[in-house]
Amino acid sequence: MHQIFSVQSIFTAFFVFLSYRLLGLLLNRLTTDTRHVPKPPGGNWLWGHELEPMSKPCGEVYAAWLEKLGPVVRMRGFIGHGDILVIADPGIVSHIFTKNAYMYPKSLVFRPLLERIVGKSLVWAEGEDHKKMRALLNPVFTAEQTRLMYESVKVCTDDMVLAFTSHINSHGGDTVVQIRDWTNRATLDIIGRVAFGHDFGCGETVEAKRITNSMAEMVALGMTRMGKIAPIILRNFPILASLPLPSIQSQGEIKLTVRAIAEHLFAKTSNNSESIEGKDLLSTLIRANINEHRGFSKDELLDHICTFVVGGYEMASATLSYTLLALAQNPGIQDKLRKEILEFGADPTYDNLSSRLPYLDAVTKEGLRMYPANAHAERVSLKDDALPLRKPLVTSTGKVLTSLRIKKGQLISVPSIAINRNNAVWGDGSTFRPERWLIPGQLPDPSESTQGWSQIFTFLEGPRMCIGYRLAILEFKVILSSLIKTFVFHDTGADVEFVWSTTLQTRIVGKEESSLPLRVTLTDP
């Protein structure tokens, strides 16, 4: 009898909770403008539309919704959660990311994940904490500081190309590789040197393998059905993120590995800045902390380095690899790029990369537009607000809305990859076409695109724009030009699709594991 009563109590409590949530959603719906935003058909009674974007290649569902319904879409959320706004309207994007960045923090799904992977660093921080951190870190990522990183970028790239050449030759000069294995080597080496003066041995050290293996495990988990469902559940029940589950706790392995390496530098230093002579980021920050009293704690410094390592190697490697896939699928574009690089002759300097190789610049911009590693983001409103619409919305009654009233707690989905590929803005947004950056009149009107770097949203915009974007672009150009100069990349014919799992990933259709095979040969001597 007691057992039956307990079950009844549980169901009663759940019913009361659900009724309360539904009543709140109804009241919010009647006092906001979200009900006027067009909604795609269908939707599961339990999951709403939330699983649909994961049922097809990353960004495709969002892109179809935006093309059919306009730059603001309302999708049904998980039962009891309410509607979620999907945005591509540049007026709303600017309002959230540039004008009111701290009023729209990351959702409860992303922050715990970021803390486990990289700690309480710049990418995790919100509000005043972020303002303080950003002000302290900005001097480390200026254009001049990035210029000083060029030598490290070039040395690490040359080491990888040498090892890659040896691998190709050992397989008769023609073989299929998992290209991410090789781009990871270069980007991890680069970020190890520029972040804290550490040599990852072209990806061969124990620490390097521990970092890449941990990332691979996280990606693999995110590709499973449970991995797709987990963010939806965590959004509604965030307390679950703190449970000691192996799949959750393992996400901290990368942070532990990187922090252990960085600890060595601290062990070698005292409070004397002259003993810290390195040009890497950590040494620079320690000197600034001592000489200028910047106010960083040791834990904060280490967390920042974790952020630079994970973001600097994984995201740069991903976008670079996907651009190589696009070049393999478009051999005419690859040949044109190789021709420019070979005709230039000597290895390009930092300044050469900025101004003397226009087609390399165009391919870089197109790769970053098409394949943003951070392909999706979420924001939550901290208070009632009105979102300005660049493109007015006409309601079913004929009323014209130039803004949308929303309530505190409104969840907003920001599909970066769909924004970058929006046909309404770019015309042929899903086509890899570097020439658009060279032919006058091919780029969208600035009023129609975001305010991010080169009118794309890959690095976000405003106060939360990626602080290391200059280094990312430098890495991309140095590695890509060196690879194209030395190798020819061929499409294997594998049916590759893009999926979201921590970051933008690739896999062969029908498979769950991450995969990006390319056939590689050496260029003619």
Image (spheres, rainbow, N blue to C red):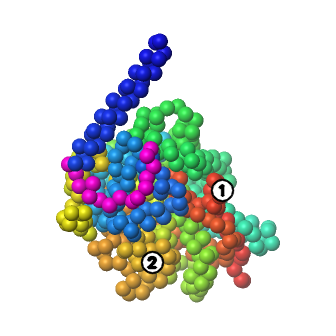
Q: Secondary structure at mark 1?
A: loop
Q: Which residue is mark 2?
A: 428
The question of residue 318 being in magenta is answered with no
Q: Quadrant of the C terminus?
A: bottom right
Magenta stretch: dominant secondary structure? loop
Q: Nearer the viewer, residue 291 or 202?
A: 202
For mark 2, give the secondary structure.
loop
110 sits to left or right of 166: left
The residue drawn where x is 46% and y is 34% is 240
The residue that disc 1 covers is 511
Which label's residue is closer to the chain start, 1 or 2? 2
Q: Which residues are magenta?
A: 31-46
Query: As rendered, which of 372 and 122 lies closer to the eye?
Result: 372
Residue 263: x percent and y percent? 52, 41
Residue type, mark 2 in image: Asp
> Could you classify mark 2 by the number of other residues whose Cα lies within 10 Å: few (under 14), some (14-19), or many (20 or more)?
few
Q: Does the CB distance between marks 1 and 2 fall below 8 Å?
A: no
In which image quadrant can residue 520 be found? Answer: bottom right
In the rendered view, tell whether residue 293 sits above or below residue 435: above
Give the residue drawn at x 34%, y 56%.
74
Residue 34 lies in the magenta stretch: yes
**Residue at the image position 60 percent from the left and 70 percent from the top:** 325
Q: Is residue 2 above or below residue 180?
A: above
Check disc 1: other Cα within 10 Å, few if <14, some if 14-19, many if 20+: few
| Residue 360 shows in this picture | yes
Q: Amino acid at mark 1?
A: Lys
Q: Disc 1 and disc 2: Cα gap in Å? A: 29 Å
